[in-house]
Amino acid sequence: MYSRYTSESPLKNRLNLTFIYYFLTLIAREDTKINSAHKKRLQPMKILFVISGVYFQEPMGTLQLSAIARKRGHKTDMAVIGLHSVVDAVKAMQPDLIAYSTMSADERMFIKHDNEVKEYLQSSGKNILRIMGGPHPTYFQNVLNTMDLDAICVGEGELAFTTILERVENNDGISGIPNVMCRGETTVEKQVVDDLDSLPFVDRALFYRARPTLSQIAMRSFLAGRGCPFQCSYCFNHAYNTMFKKAGKIHRRRSVDNLIEEIKYVKKYFPPLRFVKFADDVFIFNKSPWLEEFAEKYRREISLPFYCLMRSNVLTEDVAQLLSYAGCKSIGMALEAGNPDIRNIVLKRNLSNEVIMKSFELAAKYNITTYGGIIIGVPGSKLEDDFQSVLFAKKVKLTVPVFNICAPYAGTDITKYAVENGYLDKDFDRFPSCSEKSVFNCFPEYEKKVHQRLIYLGPLYCIIPFFPERLLRVLARFSLTRIYAIAYSVVSSYVMSRKIVPTANTKNPITWIKVLMIYFRYWFQGLKTEFNQEG
């Protein structure tokens, strides 16, 4: 006897079974298509990082991204503009992703090289993802369209880059990632890295493969934290803080143990290491439990001289004592201007002459040498204000002063100030360097040329004993910028090597000559524009 189901209609049952089989087959085929479309890459990605000229500090942001990529099993390489042809590097590596990192002053050279890359991609029919990160796309997001990039990274790139790699690994698009703006998009969600200890140590091997000579310099750079709370008008930090104020804490710090562990790692695997440079915008903000822990552990476990950046109002007696105890031999501490009104009203430094002088006295008391910046050609200032800055730098006994010509960038308060006061056209869109002739229209041509001479004569006046003020003022009148520049280069590099980074020099004479050649090569490249302007 058949059941009702099996005996009701054998033909109908067969038809039902056939339909079910056919339906399941279609689902299986569609599922295969979906899995195929999202199939994970079987081969590791090849990523080419492109940076502008390297000096004597590792490009920490780029090396951090390389470490993230290598941790995921991908291959990375680096091309350095000025040393390598980017398009030749692309042809040789055949990367899946090109990651540019640039500052605004280098935009034009990146456009030139990227145009060559685009021509190659068009002629070869290849499709390579092109992304730009760094300060320039963070503050000038229109570069996404002007360079026709696939995407830009706005702000910190570690979390964004990790997600980009995950998406590309799975053949997915990269839109909708925080801090990433893709072609056609006009807004971006913001995020910051809260836990700096979670990041891998930077990939220094990438840098030293690109610049093997620099691996023999016995100085390595490290970052102890991120963020700067100060509001200096010429700096992008205040704009960055406004941009990311809702994304999380602006100032974050690594744990002392994590920082010490990286220094030990570098000391072991990337010798020689005889001098440490902490490259934070400001190393510390006050005497804190973190600083006390750092001073004790660094002295006990690392015991190497180091350099860090400071502000005069932060360098109190307690802080100077702790830094000295830990092993600090030199600090970067800027004056910016000798005239208090220019320093505090226009540049927004909020530092009195008394505070500045006291901080340099404390540095001298604890045998800490000083390296600091002074800005000349501030919009609205007079030439005598610039001479006053030179005299003030010598008065506080700044070991190695560095003079820069004020350079306006869109988004900074100094640029807004210049536009509002008629010193700069509102449509100004150049990105001048800090050694180019002033772009402000409040200075006559003669004064602009004196500015360029003072950036070399100023340090010479401060460094060389018994250099009379009268001679400084006389020399500033003559169009001898080339001679001043060469004298400055020789004197300042010697004092830097002896007093600011005394144990970082290579002991190999051949390497020492190579390093000097690198230094002068970059330095003279930077002087070409200035010499042309001087006439």
Image (cartoon, rainbow, N blue to C red):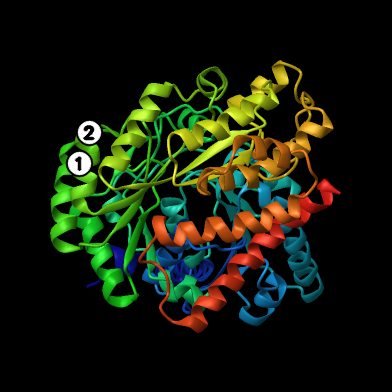
Residue density around tag 1, few if under 14, some if 14–19, many if 20 or more, within 10 Å? some
Residue 28 location (% of width, % of height): 46, 70
Q: Quadrant of the N terminus?
A: bottom left
Q: Amino acid at mark 1?
A: Gln
Q: Is residue 187 visible?
A: no
- Judge whether 528 appears above or below 397 on screen: below
> Which residue: 72% across, 46% down?
145
- Residue placed under numbered mark 1 in the picture: 321
Query: Seen in the image, is 37 located left or right of residue 322?
Result: right
Residue 126 location (% of width, % of height): 71, 72
Name the one closer to the observer, 420 or 468.
468
Residue density around tag 2, few if under 14, some if 14–19, many if 20 or more, within 10 Å? some
Query: Seen in the image, is 37 located left or right of residue 456?
Result: left
Q: Are marks 1 and 2 in contact (CB under 8 Å)?
A: yes
> Which residue: 61% across, 73% down?
517
Q: CA distance from mark 1 to mark 2?
A: 6 Å
- Does dot 1 land on a helix, a strand or a loop? helix
Residue 292 location (% of width, % of height): 15, 43
> Which residue: 39% across, 29% down?
356
Name the one closer to the observer, 121 or 528.
528
- Residue placed under numbered mark 2 in the picture: 317
Residue 132 occupies quadrant: bottom right
Q: Amino acid at mark 2?
A: Glu
- Judge whether 29 appears above or below 133 on screen: below
